[in-house]
Image (tube, rainbow, N blue to C red):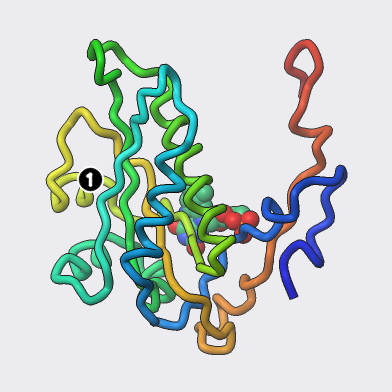
């Protein structure tokens, strides 16, 4: 069963948008370099202000010597399920425009678009792609030698789908596609309203 079988949009949309979700069950299997590059390729084609492409991705594959460094950044809750991920990614954005070093106001917005491209591509490939803010941002900056001109945005776990039954019980309870608040609470015609 796919998430789009149960998620009910208020208006018809492409089912891909409903099928992207954030599972935590992963099998522990690796993904190929080709698959990984396809995900980053999808991110590459995101739109950005002035086509500045402020996103950057630092990654570690499970079998690599970098993995431990990345894994140790995660809070314990995320470590519980990320131990079965194939790749961990730290998403960054450059705070100034590369062309003139003026502040790029939408650097995080643009990096968010790139992350969503990556996640949607992963969905089409049957992969788990799960963003996280549960990690030590300062430690990531230090350990991964990220220069000051970059903002640490989020981490992303990528892997092959696994069995819900293999997750710790408390995490199993959360392993279902979530719903959303009503559109009327999000969109406002003309001016903001509560
Ligand atoms: C930027 C970001 C940070 C997140 N941080 C975490 C996290 O640290 N741990 C976790 O288990 N899920 C995390 N999530 C997953 C969200 O809880 C999830 O996207 C949200 O509940 C909506 O569910 P869905 O992605 O399945 O549609 C994060 C998602 C995003 C986009």
**Pointer 1: what residue?**
138
Q: Residue 4, image x and y in percent?
A: 76, 62
Q: Quadrant of residue 61?
A: bottom left
| Quadrant where the C terminus is found in the figure | top right
| Quadrant where the N terminus is found in the figure | bottom right
Q: Residue at x 22, y 76 (%)?
A: 63
Residue 90 relative to residue 169: left or right: left
Q: Residue furthest bottom?
A: 165
Q: Residue at x 51, y 71 (%)?
A: 24
Residue 85 relative to residue 67: left or right: right
Residue 183 relative to residue 108: left or right: right
**Would you say the beta carbon of the disc 1 residue lies within 8 angstroms of ligand 1?**
no
When the figure is inspected, residue 109 is found, relative to residue 117, above or below; the finding is above
Residue 126 relative to residue 94: left or right: right
* 36 or 97, nearer to the observer: 36
Q: Residue furthest front?
A: 34
Mark 1 is surrounded, within 10 Å at the Cα level, by few (under 14), some (14 to 19) or many (20 or more) other residues, namely few
Q: Residue at x 81, y 66 (%)?
A: 6
When the figure is inspected, residue 173 is found, relative to residue 46, above or below; the finding is below
Q: Residue 60, image x and y in percent?
A: 25, 63
Q: Residue 89, image x and y in percent?
A: 33, 56
Q: Residue at x 81, y 17 (%)?
A: 189
* 36 or 74, nearer to the observer: 36
Q: Quadrant of residue 88?
A: bottom left
Q: Residue 80, image x and y in percent?
A: 40, 76
When the figure is inspected, residue 156 is found, relative to residue 128, above or below; the finding is above
| Disc 1 element | helix
Total residue callouts: 1
């Amino acid at each position: 069963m796919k998430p789009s079988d149960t998620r009910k949009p208020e208006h018809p949309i492409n089912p891909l948008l409903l099928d992207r979700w954030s599972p935590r069950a992963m099998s522990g299997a690796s993904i190929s370099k080709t698959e990984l590059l396809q995900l980053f390729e999808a991110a590459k084609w995101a739109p950005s202000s002035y086509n500045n492409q402020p996103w950057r991705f630092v990654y570690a594959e499970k079998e690599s010597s970098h993995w431990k460094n990345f894994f140790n950044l995660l809070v314990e809750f995320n470590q519980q399920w990320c131990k079965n991920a194939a790749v961990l990614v730290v998403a960054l954005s450059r705070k100034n425009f590369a062309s003139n070093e003026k502040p790029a106001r939408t650097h995080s917005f643009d990096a968010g678009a790139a992350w969503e491209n990556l996640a949607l591509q992963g969905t089409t490939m049957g992969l788990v792609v799960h963003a996280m803010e549960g990690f030590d941002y300062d430690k990531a900056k230090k350990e991964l030698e990220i220069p000051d001109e970059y903002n640490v945005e989020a981490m992303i776990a990528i892997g092959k789908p696994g069995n819900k039954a293999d997750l710790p019980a408390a995490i199993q309870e959360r392993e279902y596609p979530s719903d959303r608040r009503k559109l009327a609470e999000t969109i406002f015609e003309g001016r903001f309203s509560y």
